[in-house]
Image: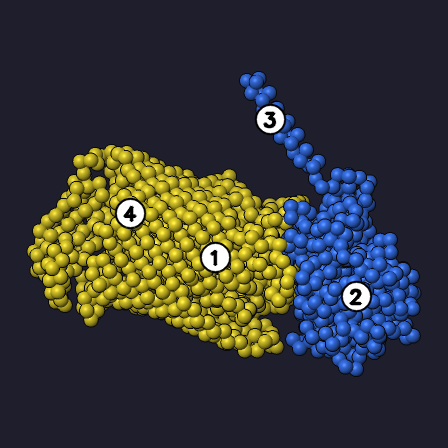
Chain colours: A blue, B yellow
């Protein structure tokens, strides 16, 4: 009997030992900070989060999630030393962070419904706008998510209705100091949307009270941002807000002749567009339409644009349904445009692109989808020269986010 | 002999007379399934449960031949001049088969199984005392996987060797059952309504018509019994009630009336593991056991038929009508994250039908059958609530989310469906060995669809017409050891769909399918090998092309027909050694399908797309062991690999599909069932029977998303093993029956879909009365 007990104990111990050892053989055992990326696939919401040690891994070989990574749906938003997976499906949204052992782990999951627009605040919170896509209601909800508390800490409803039968739909959010700026397009509530392309619109709120302040408009360009991309409004290091109006079919709008795609500014501490600032991209040397913008640090932005003549595919930016996009780097205050060279014609983002560009040591890293492949490129921010890096294989259709995390002690 | 045969049959069109009689075993018990034939003619039949038979033949002198496996065959001279009853015949057990031998004669089910097709015939008679629906029965068959999203009345997906949805066609005595509407589906038809279910895998005979890509299921009712009543009622966990009455009356003049009525009700109030997010912070609370609170189902169907049989103008002619209605509350969206508390679907159907058969039409050996039904239905999907529920049943009105609970727009979708299904067969027996058959199937489907909730939505009236023509040749040779059939099908579809975005689209397809099947007894009655092949087409169904009005499924009018090459190889071996009987079956299957139509998530809904190329390879096997008449053991298992065979990722790009030749996600791979049966006769009375059944089901895990990708937190439909048991006691040779069942004894959590929990342990008591 004793022998049996001993055998049993031995068996249990070996099981425990082997489970431990398999844990230890996990990818993330080294100490220190890590990079984390989001790997999208052709299956909706089948996305993978993967941590890696060096940016060299973005520049050589392949990025392949075959047998690697954490399966987690949703849009990945780098925020306050977390990669927040904003998922409305299955088990909800979750912040992923590095634990003391430098392993990428999920924090508490939260339930967030219908997040159509989001942006990061100065004090490292996420500001989300819950909205009704079909416009069956115009009552939208502004939500503050705190990645430290791993919970929603503020909510307020605001009616986005404008004139009779029309309402604003959010396309992006940014927060500077005590003001929230929500980029919107104004549409008819009927099936015939009749989006107002005559002006750019921003709704302004107080932060953190989320009280509505006002709605500002500017006739120099068209609606800001586009549905679900959150890449139409950014904040620079100085605290200025820049908005990007596409006037493009590729962003789901009716392009109009008498308006131009361009960039507007709201100066720090202000709640109105800067009347003296407008960068007309359509009339610039790019001769194109700015579809999406990503902050590069300082006062620069990386933009994806489409030559005006190639704006022929409805919603062409989403779903990788057009491969005629180009890139440029813009110094926003000086309006200096540096076209990106060495980068083939590429597609837009497949919905979740807000965190897809990562900046370190004067270089930007972002994956681009071309007619032939998906590949990471390193772009020198000063010169605009792109260098081809790792190829995305294994079924990955885009890299939706890249960030760097340090372990939480 | 052939000359004699020809001359007897050449006698022609003179009117037939009936010979009736009864066959008993030497112990005086009625012998069921005994073959009774007029020797040297094509006239033959099987006895019913009471040992009775009935034969129609031209007047003349015959030898009546009675054969039954395990018994000595018997031959009696008969001078048949007018309708007459033959003296009862007793058959003796064979010398080689002493009283220890336990296998009985070749049943109809066995005969069906011996066809050249890859076919599984499920004998329902053994299941009459269970409260199972047909889905639960079929789910225990090789190659079959029924995936359910919940309890009684919930949506289900029937898959057969890698094919599912509309790729597999369902029939009731040859009439497609989808024409009876949602009140008459595999998850509510009671077992007592039918005698057996024939599952055709990969290759489908033309008689069934239709455009199945990879298989068909034909529910076969008992047509031999002239009078019976079978009434049953069961109740069980989750406030589930099922009642069914099946009855037939046949007058001496050949007037027939059939009534099948059944009703189902359940609250489906089973518990699931769920957590409730805090309404302010969004933080999920602890996992709790919470009840389904909006999952009720009620359904009622009455099918009645009247007509005549054995008339000059018709072997039978039946005119019938089915009336049915159902209502199903909806509890959840695609996963349990979306809790639904108000949305529901309901439908009403009225289905007139006609069934006709005439043998010796115009000329001897030509048989015509016609089965047609017309479905008038109203189907509604009601999703108009602004409430947002959690699993406790509490709700808030989230006005910014004031689409419906499932849909992004509030929906009160009303479909007025009118569809005609008609299946006509002509069969000509050239001689005893060769026959030809012609099938014509027509499906006309039109519907008016309108989201009555909105005024901006334009009501549309799409329609689809399908015409399918089939021709087959069958050979039976080498003393029936070889059977062979070959066939061709012409398929044609025309339709018109109006989409909100693209205007009117007129899909139109014309395709030619063909196939062949052969079976050969290497050892007569013992070892049979089979091979079959079909180049099959499936035309897109109405719902795939048209969607369901944007409720769950968006329309895709650019869908192409599916095409598949299906190959089956199989063997069946059975042997009886005195008290032991053994049977083994094995099948290898291969399917290569192009333009495979598969649902794909389309935001919060799904859309059917042509998933370009799929390859299915599978193997399945069955083992049976029996000891006398006391004990049976059955085991079956299925393993199948479904590979993505697309070689480009996106049409029009040069991107490589790295998932080429990898397993298609969200498809079951490995599963099996085992069953132990114990039978105790004459416990207290001479005519009682006590049955114990223990069963277990196993399903291997599979992934929701591409299985090659990811390491941690993979969304997995977990491996599941569950056990069930039933006890049944019958009195008076099955007239009074009581059965107690426990499903999922250990209350294992069951899933067919990711994060959609099904009912766990349940108890059911069934009472049944049967009289013939």
Mark 4 and mark 1, same subunit? yes
Q: Is residue B296 left or right of residue A27?
A: left
**Alpha carbon separation for disc pair 4 and 3:** 52 Å
Number of residues whose C-alpha sits closer than 10 Å to that of mark 4, classed few (under 14), some (14–19) or many (20 or more): many
Q: Dot 3 lies on which element?
A: helix
Identify the residue under disc 3. Answer: A11
Identify the residue under disc 2. Answer: A327
Identify the residue under disc 4. Answer: B521
The answer to which image quadrant residue A187 occupies is: bottom right
Q: In this view, does B273 lie to the left or right of A161?
A: left
Place of residue A345 in the rendered image (x, y in percent of width and height, measured from the top left): 73, 66
Q: Is residue A265 left or right of residue A73?
A: right
To which chain does the residue with label 1 belong?
Answer: B
To which chain does the residue with label 2 belong?
Answer: A
Q: Is residue A375 visible?
A: yes
Number of residues whose C-alpha sits closer than 10 Å to that of mark 1, classed few (under 14), some (14–19) or many (20 or more): some
Place of residue B441 in the rendered image (x, y in percent of width and height, measured from the top left): 36, 69
Marked residue nearer the N-terminal end (4 or 1): 4
């Amino acid at each position: 009997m004793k022998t049996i007990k001993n055998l049993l104990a031995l068996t249990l111990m070996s099981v425990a030992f082997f489970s431990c050892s398999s844990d230890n053989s996990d990818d993330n055992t080294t100490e220190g900070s890590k990079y984390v990326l989001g790997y999208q696939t052709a299956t909706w919401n089948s996305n993978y989060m993967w941590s890696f040690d060096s940016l060299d891994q973005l520049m050589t070989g392949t990025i392949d999630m075959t047998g690697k990574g954490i399966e987690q749906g949703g849009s990945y938003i780098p925020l306050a030393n977390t990669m927040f997976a904003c998922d409305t499906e299955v088990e909800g949204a979750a912040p992923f962070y590095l634990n003391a052992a430098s392993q990428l782990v999920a924090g508490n999951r939260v339930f967030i419904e219908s997040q159509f627009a989001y942006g990061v605040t100065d004090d490292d919170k996420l500001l989300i706008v819950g909205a009704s896509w079909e416009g069956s209601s115009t009552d939208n909800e502004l939500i503050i998510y705190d990645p430290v508390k791993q919970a929603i800490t503020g909510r307020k409803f605001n009616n986005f209705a404008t004139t009779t039968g029309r309402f604003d739909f959010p396309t992006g959010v940014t927060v500077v100091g005590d003001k929230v700026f929500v980029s919107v397009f104004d549409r008819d509530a009927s099936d015939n949307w009749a989006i107002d392309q005559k002006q750019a619109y921003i709704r302004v709120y107080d932060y953190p009270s989320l009280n509505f302040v006002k709605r500002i408009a500017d006739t120099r360009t068209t609606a800001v941002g586009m549905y679900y991309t959150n890449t139409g409004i950014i904040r620079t290091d100085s605290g200025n807000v820049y908005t990007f109006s596409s006037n493009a079919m590729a962003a789901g709008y009716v392009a109009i002749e008498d308006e131009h795609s361009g960039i507007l500014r709201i100066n720090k501490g202000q709640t109105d567009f800067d009347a003296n600032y407008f960068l007309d991209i359509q009339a610039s040397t790019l001769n194109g339409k700015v579809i999406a913008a990503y902050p590069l640090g300082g006062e620069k932005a990386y933009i994806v644009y489409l030559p005006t003549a190639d704006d022929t595919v409805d919603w062409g930016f989403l779903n990788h349904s057009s491969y005629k996009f180009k890139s440029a780097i813009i110094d926003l205050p000086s309006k200096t445009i540096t076209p990106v060279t060495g980068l083939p014609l590429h597609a837009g983002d497949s919905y979740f692109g807000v965190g897809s560009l990562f900046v370190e040591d004067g270089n930007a890293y972002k994956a681009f989808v071309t007619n032939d492949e998906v590949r990471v490129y390193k772009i020198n921010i000063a010169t605009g020269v792109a260098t081809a890096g790792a190829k995305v294989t294994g079924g990955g259709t885009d890299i939706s986010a890249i960030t760097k995390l340090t372990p939480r002690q | 002999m052939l000359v004699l045969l020809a001359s007897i049959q050449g006698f022609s069109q003179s009117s037939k007379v009936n010979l009736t009689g009864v066959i008993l075993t030497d112990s005086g018990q009625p012998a069921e399934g005994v073959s009774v034939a007029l020797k040297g003619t094509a006239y033959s039949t099987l006895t019913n449960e009471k040992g009775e038979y009935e034969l129609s033949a031209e007047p003349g002198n015959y030898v009546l031949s009675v054969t039954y496996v395990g018994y000595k065959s018997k031959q009696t001279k008969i001078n048949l001049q007018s309708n007459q009853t033959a003296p009862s015949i007793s058959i003796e057990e064979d010398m080689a088969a002493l009283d220890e031998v336990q296998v009985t004669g070749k049943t109809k089910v066995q005969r069906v199984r011996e066809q050249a097709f890859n076919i599984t015939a499920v004998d329902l008679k053994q299941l009459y005392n269970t409260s199972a629906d047909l889905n639960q029965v079929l789910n225990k068959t090789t190659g079959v996987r029924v995936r359910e999203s919940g309890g009684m009345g919930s949506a289900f997906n029937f898959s057969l060797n890698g094919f599912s949805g509309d790729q597999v066609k369902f029939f009731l005595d040859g009439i497609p059952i989808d024409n009876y509407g949602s009140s008459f589906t595999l998850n509510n038809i009671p077992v007592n309504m039918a005698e057996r279910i024939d599952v055709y895998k990969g290759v489908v005979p033309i008689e069934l018509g239709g455009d199945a890509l990879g298989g068909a299921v034909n529910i076969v009712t008992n047509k031999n019994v002239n009078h019976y009543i079978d009434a049953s009622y069961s109740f069980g966990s989750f406030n589930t009630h099922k009642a069914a009455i099946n009855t037939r009356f046949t007058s001496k003049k050949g007037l027939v009336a059939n009534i099948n009525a059944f009703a189902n009700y359940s609250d489906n109030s089973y518990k699931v593991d769920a957590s409730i997010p805090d309404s302010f912070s969004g933080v999920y609370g602890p996992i709790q056991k919470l009840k389904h609170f909006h999952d009720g189902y009620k359904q009622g169907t009455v099918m009645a038929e009247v007509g005549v049989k054995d008339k000059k103008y018709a072997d039978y002619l039946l005119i019938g009508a089915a009336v049915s209605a159902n209502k199903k509350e909806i509890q959840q969206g695609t996963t349990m994250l979306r809790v639904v508390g108000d949305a529901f679907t309901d439908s009403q159907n009225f289905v007139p039908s006609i069934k006709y058969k005439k043998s010796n039409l115009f000329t001897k050996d030509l048989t015509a059958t016609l089965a047609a039904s017309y479905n008038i239905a109203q189907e509604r999907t009601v999703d108009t609530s602004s409430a947002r529920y959690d699993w406790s049943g509490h709700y808030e009105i989230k006005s910014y989310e004031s689409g419906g609970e499932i849909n992004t727009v509030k929906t009160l979708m009303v479909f007025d469906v009118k569809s005609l299904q008609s299946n006509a067969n002509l069969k000509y027996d050239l001689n005893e060995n060769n026959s030809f058959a012609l099938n014509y199937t027509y499906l006309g489907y039109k519907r008016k669809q309108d989201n009555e909730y909105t005024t901006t939505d334009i009501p549309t009236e799409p329609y689809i017409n399908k015409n399918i023509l089939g021709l087959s040749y069958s050979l039976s040779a080498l003393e029936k050891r070889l059977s062979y059939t070959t066939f061709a099908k012409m398929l044609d579809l025309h339709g018109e769909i109006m989409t909100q975005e693209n205007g009117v689209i007129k899909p139109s397809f014309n395709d030619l399918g063909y196939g062949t099947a052969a079976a050969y007894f290497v050892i007569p009655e013992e070892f049979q090998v089979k091979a079959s092949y079909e180049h099959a087409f499936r035309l897109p169904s109405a719902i795939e092309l048209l969607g369901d009005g944007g409720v769950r499924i968006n329309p895709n009018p650019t869908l192409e027909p599916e095409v598949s090459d299906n190959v089956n190889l199989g063997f069946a071996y059975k042997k009886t050694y005195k008290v032991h009987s053994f049977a083994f079956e094995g099948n290898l299957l291969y399917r290569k399908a192009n333009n495979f139509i598969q649902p794909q998530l389309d935001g919060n809904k799904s859309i059917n797309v042509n998933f370009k190329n799929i390859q299915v390879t599978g193997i399945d096997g069955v083992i049976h062991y029996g000891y006398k008449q006391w004990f049976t053991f059955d085991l079956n298992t299925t393993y199948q690999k479904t590979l993505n065979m697309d070689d480009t990722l996106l049409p029009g790009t040069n991107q490589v599909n790295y998932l080429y030749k990898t397993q298609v996600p969200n498809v079951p791979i490995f599963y099996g069932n085992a069953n132990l049966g114990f039978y105790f006769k004459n416990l207290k009375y001479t005519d009682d029977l006590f049955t114990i059944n223990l069963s277990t089901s196993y399903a291997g895990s599979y992934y929701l998303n591409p299985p090659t990708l990811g390491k941690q937190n993979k969304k997995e439909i977990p491996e599941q093993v569950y056990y069930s048991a039933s006890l049944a006691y019958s009195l008076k040779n099955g007239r009074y029956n009581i059965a107690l069942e426990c499903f999922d004894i250990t209350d294992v959590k069951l899933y067919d879909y990711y994060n959609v929990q099904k009912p766990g342990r349940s108890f059911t008591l069934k009472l049944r009365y049967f009289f013939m």
